Image: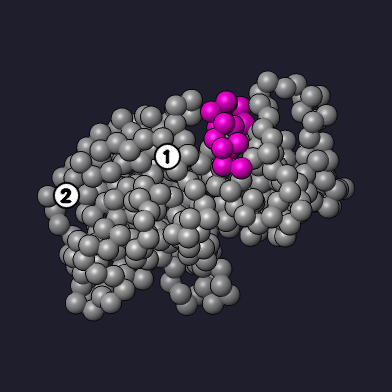
Amino acid sequence: MTLTCRIHGAKDLRIEDDGPAELGASDVEMRLGAGGICGSDLHYYQHGRVGAFVMREPLIPGHEVSGTVARVGSNVTRVKIGDKVAINPSHACGHCDYCNAGRLNLCRQMRFLGSASVYPHVQGMFRERFVMGERQLTPVTEDISLGELACAEPLSIGLHAVHRAGNLTGKTVLVTGGGTIGCMSVIAAKLAGAAWIVCCDIAPRPLEMAKRVGADAVIRSDQASEAELTAQLADSADICIEAAGSPAALATCLKAARKGGRIVQVGTLPAEGVLFPANAIMARELDYVGAFRAAHAFDWAVQYLRSGKVDVKPLLSAQIPLSRSLEAFELASDRTRSTKVQVVCD
């Protein structure tokens, strides 16, 4: 039997036993190495939805995962038994118009692991053993832990956000939100040559993490009046990356962006929508662009991790056995105590 974490609805997380999965000729059976609990996993657990993606059946969460190869199909050549592997949760079709244009993350038939974006849902990887197609696996021989390797996916989100931002060399960048994706955006902005990076958040721990991974300055936005925030940030940033998924954070970005600047929306805003001051976009000629998942940036993230150019260890708060997934989700929900909580095999 395979121990599995499954969400049946809001606040209804269960640990269940599943039978073994069938293995096709081009498939690989993986043993869970480490699985990071993402903000979207928390939304499914807390609310039964993420933005417009609503659960309509029980869902196995988990898309930030690394593992080791346990079994291989007869046609598999990419990996072998015992390999340590980074796992790309995106399975694009490879032949639609978006895939042909190189925008794999926008694939018309995307199957993204641990997501309710389609029905039947695409089940995730928070289970002791699971089966993957070999093309989603990258074997890694370098001396890197499975916990670090599981951070390839969130790092890819930050890298893709920065890619959408354009040239950052010598620029001032504001990141709103000091959670995992905000911190990964800070890392990515630094790699891209940003001269000055500021991070805003409403809690001290996320700001401490942002400074540890490269932010030059941090601001407790909840402790400043609107006038003080305006004085500190108005017309200060060439690029703003909104990674909090908060209407207030987006408002901060609109204040901070210089005329002709760009705002990159990474965080998932409330499903009911926000009051949007479009006239500010028009009058100040701001670019407002989205960054959704990661496209080719997953491969970039794996290479940065295996080369040692990026250190994600400061963000790893705890590793908790899969059998105690409820405890892990509760810890991950507490931003005062954690940044990235991972589940691991018992």
| Magenta stretch holds residue 280 | no
Query: Is tag 1's residue or tag 2's residue first in the polypeptide sequence?
Result: 2
Q: Position of residue 116 (x, y in %)?
A: 40, 50
Please state which of residues 142 and 333 is positioned toward the viewer in this rendering. 142
Q: 317 or 330: which is nearer to us?
A: 317
- What's the magenta region? 201-214
- Could you classify mark 1 by the number of other residues whose Cα lies within 10 Å: few (under 14), some (14-19), or many (20 or more)? some
Q: Residues within 10 Å of mark 2 (few under 14, many from 20)?
A: some
Instruction: Look at 39% across and 42% down and name the residue there.
Output: 37
Considering the numbered disc 2 on the image, is that residue within a helix, a strand or a loop? strand
Q: Which residue is painted at 66% across and 26% down in the image? A: 220
Reading the image, the residue beneath label 1 is 316
Residue 20, given in percent of the width and then of the height, sits at: 15, 57
Q: CA distance from mark 1 to mark 2?
A: 26 Å
Q: Quadrant of residue 270?
A: top right
What residue is disc 2 on? 2
Amino acid beneath label 1 = Leu
Q: Looking at the image, which residue is at 20% across and 41% down?
A: 346
Does residue 127 show up?
yes
* Residue in the foreground of this view, choosing between 303 and 26: 303
- At which x and y percent is residue 235? 83, 40
Residue 268 in sight: no
Q: Residue at x 60, y 36 (%)?
A: 211
- Rendering quarter of residue 10: top left
Mark 2: amino acid: Thr
